Amino acid sequence: MISKTAIEQLIEKLGAENVASEKEDLLVLGYDSTPGIHCLPEVAVYPTSREGVLAAMEIAGREGLPIVPRGSGTGLSGGSVPVKGGMVLCLNRMNRILEIDEENLTATCEAGVITLDLFNATAARGLFYPPDPGSQKISTLGGNVMEDAGGLRGLKYGVTRDYVMALQCVLPDGSLLTTGGKSVKDVAGYAFKDLLVGSEGTLGIITEITVKLIPPPQAKRTILAYFDDIRAAGEAVSKIIAAKIIPSTMEIMDKATINCVEDYVKIGLPRQMAALLLIEVDGHPAMVEEDAQKVDLILRQVKAAQIHIAKDAEEAGKLAAARRTALSALARVSPTTLLEDATVPRSMLAETFAEIERLTAKYKLTVGTFGHAGDGNLHPTVLCDERNAEEMQRAHAFYDDLYDKVLAWGGTVSGEHGIGLAKKEYLARQIGAGGVKVMKRIKNAFDPKGMLNPGKIFSDDDPSTQSQVEEGFCVSH
Amino acid sequence: MSRTKEKLGNFTQLDAPKYEDVLQCMRCGFCLPTCPTFALTGRERSSPRGRVALARAVAEQKLEFTDAVKQEAFFCLDCRACTTACPSGVRAGEVMEICRSQSHQQVPLGHVGNSFRKFILQRMLPDPELMERSMLPARLYQRLGIQWLVRHSKALKLGPAWMEKAEGMLPELKAPLRPQLPVITEAVGEKRGRIGFFLGCVMTLMYPDVSRQTVRVLAYQGFDVVTPRATKCCGAPHLSEGDRQTARELALFNLDLFLQADVDYIVTDCAGCGAALKEYEELLDGETEHERLASFRAKVRDVSEFLTEVGLRTGGLKPVQKSVTYHEPCHLCHAQSISRQPRDLIQQIPGVELREMEEASWCCGSAATWGLKFSEESRQVLDRKLDNVRKTEAEILVTANPGCQLQLAWGVRERDLPVQVLHIMELLGEATP
């Protein structure tokens, strides 16, 4: 348990308003958006500068407290959950956009900046920051970098990693590491930056991020297609890619998802359809025109039940916003939404849908599937009730079987949510014991004492650091 | 249902949240950017997601119903912006409202505080005549020039901040409307129906001229307007303060009164009353036949909602050559999902130019007594609103709820902004011959 002196020191260094140790504060910093996980940290700090981060880490080190960085707590794999207690380092008060460099096409900001705020600030200068995770309205850049968040535009524009140019971070021994820069090319030594992206707070605490910006597309066209059979939608996706068209967005929702989303947004989505595809093509107006026509032709070939073109940017925006609510809207149906992040090579999409259908029937579950079809990245979501242990078991068996297939097809257990706590076993299955060992060695090189976000990505071997679990609630002291 | 069958965790049995309602939150955080108190503090426990998590922890016996839980229940503005933002259908505001009721059971006030609260909620508000009499001193205070004296001597600087603000917010008080308004005001022109007008307490006491316009507008629109004199407080202050029992008693009374009045619709010009009236069905579940509750609920309309639904008769309306911006009362847009209708009405008034402000549906910081209890925080929320108002450079700021109107008019006066604050029915009244 954290000592009184340590709390006093934290208050002295960071200010009383930036340190929380009341149980009511700590209780609500022990979760993210991952179901079924809730832990209790010992202290929470809200540094407002890199010096503050450094000071907090020093004190945590002295106290032997694990350090868990947290942005807005919207993660979907438990990355920011203090599973071993310790100190939650909230970065959401470090939220200044420091620079938008129009000559180098970069933006530099603190780790706690909200993703959409950065998007808006750069858009106001006629520039474009493409990564747009579903939670962009509230997720932080730091969190996006740590989990290598994707989004709706991943198909054409890539994910967070593709935009990170430089990172400034604090290592557990108190040293500062700046990696990367504004140069377009950089092959000087190991690519620390790439190692840090997606490291889920296990290697260092990021304080500052420089991202690449691009000119925004001049034109856009949003197409909505409905299908009587979800496999036809999968086929459409594969055919569009095979026709060498790269839409900026190609999102899918199945019937269950369409209905939940429509319950919330009420924009007239057809409830009886088996699936919908939301496709956006963007770029030069002439090319957009041509791509839209080709997409339309393919949709007709695969016998889409209906094809609808958004009449203006406002309607397109509404459709994209509706899609972003999919996961949360599914939570209307049941108390627990268990979601996964399986990603397959795109040619295997139709098979994946078939497999999901088969397993849904086999395990007698209710499943809503949506996701980034164009990336082969699906979010089959089991709608269940965590109070029903037997149902939860079936849900886990569903994912076990599904991941066997996904891995056999050369897919991955996480396209964009990270491993965190939720998918450690699946990762081991994917990369094998040897792969996990190398990852641990890398972790050890950055963080020899294991202070940073312990228990994430892979399991700690040391049983003495295991948390005590009490009726499904991890208590660290 | 007031009593749950089984006691839920560390809640008492009377008026506890339902476990399903807190379990529904999947913690996506979509509510965070819409919550004024989270915007103020950046503290998770002062966010809807955090508050629901606290309630869940109490339900799961991970936490006692502590003083901090009570603080959060009352620090919540109950603006319901999070309800609008929540794709999962969680109603954090209502969970907090119920936690306020728990607060009084579990973390009671001291003797003096409790007696005062009981007097206001259980004696004064349920009795329209007592309320009218109690306003007399305030009217005399204004009439006799004492207000002028007090304000100029800055005497109130010595007292608590809320007292100075409360005094500053007082509009020019006129005689209460309730005893003056005819029980039946007859329709003008071709009659379209018969409506029961629910005259709210704040409207009759503070804004008699507004509701007078409402009745005039409704009559001009072709409706016989019945205003039952016996109407009691809708119960909103009680729900907001966590006295659900008195709220139920008032609700039952009003339910009987308006069902007997044999009207086609029950219309109010107060967003707070409208939201409460629409919640009677839930509040009184199990207290009376469901049929009666459903029939009552089916008739309740906010005045903007009503006029848009039946169609505004625009023939004969006089032009109002003004630029107008519209502030959405939380209890209209978030609690009743009425957002489009007031704008439709405003735009149907000839001559009016509607200018949208940014964040029109962000709370103004009034929120029943919140604006007095947390006067500094309220000021910050109000500043954000007034900055957005100012940017529109509109001549008139229209709203549809007396709480907002008091707060906005006060803010405009304090800041000396060149904008007139009106209720939407005053604007429509100006256009009505």
Image: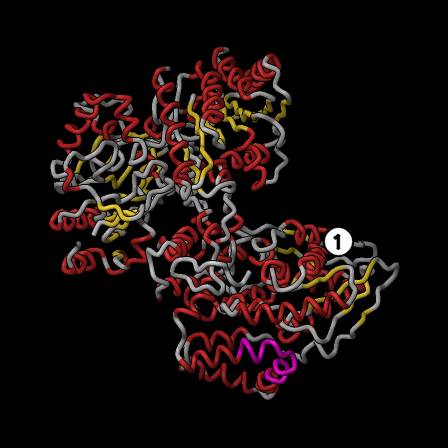
Tag 1 secondary structure: loop
User: Mark 1: few, some, or many residues within 10 Å (few <14, many ≥20)?
Assistant: some
Viewer-nearest residue: A143 or B95: B95
User: Is A314 positioned to the left or the right of A90 in the image?
Assistant: right
Residue B369 lies, in percent from the top left, at 50, 69
Check the image and report above or below for B325 versus B157.
above
User: What residue lies at 59% left-to-right and 53% top-to-bottom?
Assistant: B333
Residue B396, can we see it? Answer: no
Q: In the image, residue B360 lies at what x, y percent?
A: 55, 53
Q: Is residue A120 depicted above or below B411 in this figure?
A: above
**Residue A444 location in percent, x, y?**
14, 32
Considering only vertical position in the picture, is B256 above or below A246?
below
Residue A20 as seen in the image, left or right of residue B235: left
Residue B297 visible from this viewpoint = yes
| B128 relative position to B20: left or right | right
Q: Is B301 colored magenta in this rendering?
A: no
Question: Residue B3, position in %: x, y?
Answer: 51, 63
Q: How was the colour assigned to the protein in this rendering?
A: secondary structure
Snapshot quadrant of residue A136? top left
| B127 magenta-colored | yes
Q: Amino acid at mark 1?
A: Pro
At a point 17% along the width and 29% down the height, the residue shown is A440
**Residue found 29% across the figure and 41% down from its top:** A80
Look at mark 1 in the image and give the residue it sits on: B350
| Closer to us: A202 or B174 | A202
Tell me the magenta residue range: B120-134
What is the chief secondary structure element of the magenta stretch?
A: helix
